[in-house]
Image (cartoon, rainbow, N blue to C red):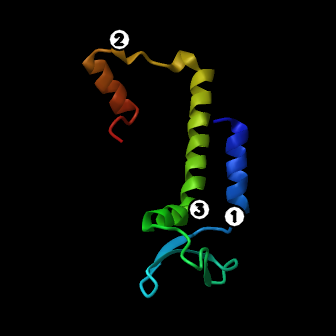
Amino acid sequence: MTQQQLNEIRERCEKATPAPWNYFYKDKYREHHVSIPAYADSGFKMALFPNGCPSTKEDAVFIGNARQDIPALLDYIAELESRLEKAVETPEKIIDFSKLSYAELAVFLEKHGGNS
C-alpha cells in the first residue's frame, strides 16, 4: 500500500461523521442497522441504513466499527513506519541476538523492559 493510498483513506475517515458509530438490531423488523451521531455533541443518533441495508449482523457490526477501527489502524501503521524509519536510520543499534549467550540476553531484556 502506498503512502498516497493511506493518505486517501485517512482523508475519507476525517471527512466522515465522527465516531462512535454503533450497530443495533431492530427486533420488530428483524433488521440490522448502524447508527451515527446526528450532529456534533447533540447526543442524538440517526440510522445510517434506515431500511436495514446491511444483509447480516456481521456486515452491520463491521460497518458500525469501521469508523473507529480504520483510524486506529492508520495510527498504528504510522507508528510502525516511524519505528521502522528510526531502525533504518540507526543500524548500528541493531543487535544480533543470536550472538548473545542466554545470560547476556537475560541482562539485556532486564535492562530494556523485556517483560512487558
Residue at 31 percent across and 19 percent down: it is 104
The percent coordinates of residue 79 (x first, y second) are: 58, 41
The numbered disc on residue 67 is 3
The percent coordinates of residue 55 (x first, y second) are: 49, 67
Q: Residues within 10 Å of mark 2 (few under 14, many from 20)?
A: few
Residue to which mark 2 is pinned: 99
Q: Earlier in the sequence, mark 3 or mark 1?
A: 1
SS at badge 3: helix
Q: Earlier in the sequence, mark 1 or mark 2?
A: 1
Q: Nearer the viewer, residue 48 or 113?
A: 48
Residue at 26 percent across and 20 percent down: it is 103
Q: Residues within 10 Å of mark 1 (few under 14, many from 20)?
A: few
Q: Residues within 10 Å of mark 3 (few under 14, many from 20)?
A: many
Q: Amino acid at mark 2?
A: Lys
Q: Amino acid at mark 1?
A: Ala
Alpha carbons under labels 3 and 1: distance apart: 8 Å
Q: Nearer the viewer, residue 62 or 53?
A: 53
Q: Is residue 10 left or right of residue 28?
A: right
Residue at 52 percent across and 72 percent down: it is 22
On screen, residue 101 above or below 49: above
